[in-house]
Image (cartoon, rainbow, N blue to C red):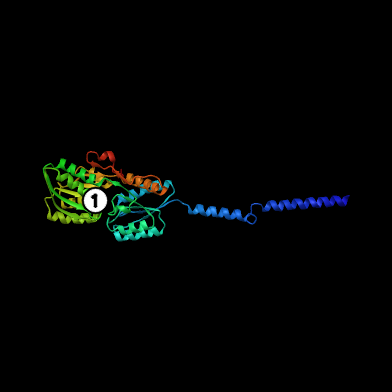
């Protein structure tokens, strides 16, 4: 009887140990190799699927306008955990094309482009199309708009036109005008075209005595204006294609000691608004646009394109005049 009891106890102990061994092995990679491999694949897929990757290439990232534009785009993309790769062309069209090719190699799904040169950017647009990268053209148009999926910018002709209208009010008897432009940037071309339309429709005798390419830059505008003022000492008005040019022209006018010259810009930048708050400024006004509004609309449009949702192919943000009378409404601490 005792022998049978011991045999029974031994059998029970062996069974318990066997069960314990099985329980310990449950859920281990060794005993669940297929499940472990499946989990590993899932984790890898999650790491790779980080969302869309966007590129950003604007004329010059030392220009506060483009810094603000990029920040507005990034604000929207960050909410969705999407990636934004930014490169600075430094106002060099060849460098911009090279950097865009690098971003294609980085695997971008879409790109926000403001071209340094609206014609020379075509080479990069062709490469982007071949790589099936979606193109969101912002602020200033490319020459070959057929490559572009969407355009978001300001009504640049209207921006120039309202500067011309303001000038007609301030100088009803006409005057001599210098134009500071940048033929490689279509946004500036449109602004100057709008300005010329406004003043040509007036009976007043306005005369454009000279014009110069400033490349859209402060330093070049300063140097060119200084040279032009040596020849044209009786100038009345300087129309500038953007606010950076206007700040350069204002500096040159001040250095020349000219008090009665009227200067217009386009952008509504903090620097110009600070100038407008001065009682003795030569800045008459700036046709303001909103890089914040443009950037946010561009980001939303880019996401819609990649999601396969409906989107507007062209969006034009409103422009409006900021001058000494209303500048305090907008403040000078940032962009509108």
Report x, y in % for residue 179: 18, 51
Residue placed at 33% from the left, 56% from the top? 125
Density class for disc 1 (Cα within 10 Å; few <14, some 14-19, many ≥20) is many
Which quarter of the figure is the C terminus placed in?
Answer: top left
- Is 139 positioned to the left or the right of 192 in the image? right
What residue sits right under mark 1 in the picture? 188
Report x, y in % for residue 279: 20, 42
Count the marks: how many?
1
* Residue 137, visible in the rendered structure: yes
Residue placed at 12% from the left, 55% from the top? 231
Q: Nearer the viewer, residue 254 or 68?
A: 68
The secondary element bearing badge 1 is classed as helix
Q: Residue furthest right?
A: 1
- Is 172 positioned to the left or the right of 222 in the image? left
* Residue 247, visible in the rendered structure: no
Report x, y in % for residue 318: 28, 42
Q: Nearer the viewer, residue 226 or 98?
A: 98
Residue placed at 84% from the left, 51% from the top? 6
Quarter holding residue 317: top left
Report x, y in % for residue 49: 48, 52
């Amino acid at each position: 009887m005792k022998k049978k009891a011991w045999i029974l106890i031994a059998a029970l102990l062996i069974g318990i140990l066997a069960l314990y061994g099985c329980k310990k092995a449950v859920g281990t990679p060794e005993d669940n190799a297929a499940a472990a491999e499946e989990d590993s694949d899932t984790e890898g897929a999650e790491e790779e699927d980080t969302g869309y990757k966007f590129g950003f290439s604007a004329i010059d990232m030392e220009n506060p306008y483009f810094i603000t534009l990029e920040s507005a785009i990034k604000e929207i993309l960050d909410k969705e955990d999407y990636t934004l790769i930014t490169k600075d062309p430094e106002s060099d069209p060849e460098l911009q094309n090279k950097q865009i090719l690098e971003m294609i190699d980085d695997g971008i799904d879409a790109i926000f482009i403001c071209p340094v040169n609206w014609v020379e950017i075509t080479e990069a647009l062709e490469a982007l199309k071949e790589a099936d990268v979606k193109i969101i053209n912002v602020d200033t148009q490319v020459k070959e708009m057929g490559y572009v999926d969407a355009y978001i910018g300001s009504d640049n002709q209207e921006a120039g036109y309202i500067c011309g209208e303001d000038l007609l009010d301030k100088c009803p008897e006409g005057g001599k005008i210098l134009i500071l432009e940048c033929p490689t940037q279509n946004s500036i071309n449109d602004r100057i075209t709008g300005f010329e339309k406004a003043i040509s429709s007036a009976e007043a005798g306005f005369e454009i005595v000279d014009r110069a390419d400033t490349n859209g830059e402060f330093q070049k505008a300063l140097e060119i204006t200084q040279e032009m003022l040596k020849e044209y000492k009786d100038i009345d008005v300087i129309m500038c294609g953007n606010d950076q040019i206007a700040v350069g022209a204002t500096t040159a006018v001040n250095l020349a000691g000219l008090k009665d010259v009227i200067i217009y810009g386009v952008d509504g930048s903090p620097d110009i608004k600070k100038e407008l708050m001065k009682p003795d400024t030569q800045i008459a006004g700036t046709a303001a646009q909103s890089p914040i509004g443009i950037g946010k609309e561009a980001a939303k449009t880019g996401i819609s394109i990649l999601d396969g949702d409906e989107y507007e192919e062209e969006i034009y943000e409103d422009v409006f005049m900021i001058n000494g009378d209303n500048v305090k409404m907008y403040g000078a601490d940032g962009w509108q």
